[in-house]
Amino acid sequence: MSKVKHIVEIRYVVYSVSVPKLWTATLAAHRMEVRDAILDTAAALVHERGLRAITMSEIAERTGIGRATLYHYYPDVETILVAWHERHVNAHIERLAGLRDQPGIPAVRLNAVLEAYALIQHRRHASEAAALLHRDEHARESQEHLHDLVRGLLLEAVETGDVRNDIAPDELAEYCLYALAAASSLPSEEAVRRLVSVTLAGLRPAMT
């Protein structure tokens, strides 16, 4: 075998092995970008016109893709909105988990997580879309994840004596999440922070 032919064959092998991997990564990134664009477009249209006023054709046109391409990703508007909601909720959970994992005493981290959660509730618009999306299976799983996150912090704060130990942490976690859900109807962020303070007061050890 000549030296030139040997080099050509080596290059062919390297090309045939490495390019498909690069192509796969590029294709996956492209698909993610298209999905994100579709979800962002649908959310913007719902905000502008309401849940019942948008169509797949409109989403495709605003996104800048063909209808066939859109249907390749999602079968209908509701599926698109559920996917958007999952992405939105996951981002909130990641933010709360980041606050939980910061250095510092448990009581301070608990305060930060509960305040952030209450502000998220306050900024969430009560709408037809929200009512629909908060009934899906992912929403229930997310609520369970939130419960576990808060419960874990409560257990840490019980150990340091900052949270009462006469009530089960599971019950206290439910108390926190249900109490702070009321933040969605409060008129201002100042009112939300007052609600957080009242909620935290209910967690403190009873005076002897």
Image: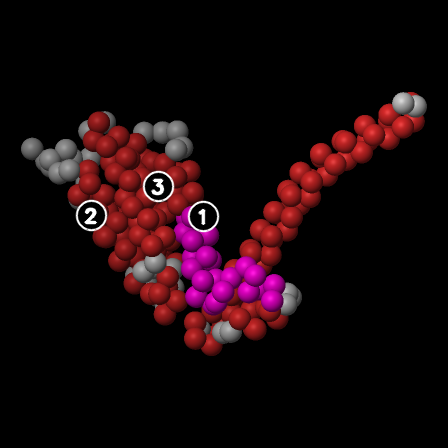
Indicate the position of residue 27 as horizontal and vertical percent values.
65, 48
Per the image, label 1 sits on a secondary structure element best described as helix
> Type of residue at label 3?
Ala
Q: Is residue 83 above or below residue 58?
A: above
Q: Which mark is residue 112?
A: 3
The residues tagged by marks 1 and 2 sit, at their Cα atoms, a distance apart of 23 Å
**Residue position for label 2:** 175
Bounds of the magenta span?
Answer: 68-92
Q: Is residue 6 above or below residue 143?
A: above
**Residue 169, picture quadrant:** top left
100 or 131: nearer the viewer? 131
Indicate the position of residue 18 as horizontal and vertical percent values.
71, 35
Indicate the position of residue 123 as horizontal and vertical percent values.
39, 58
> Type of residue at label 1?
Ala
Q: Which mark is residue 169?
A: none
Q: Residue at 47% of width from left, 58% of height from top?
A: 84
**Residue position for label 1:** 91
The residues tagged by marks 3 and 1 sit, at their Cα atoms, a distance apart of 16 Å
Q: Check if residue 2 falls in the magenta segment.
A: no
Indicate the position of residue 124 as horizontal and vertical percent values.
38, 60
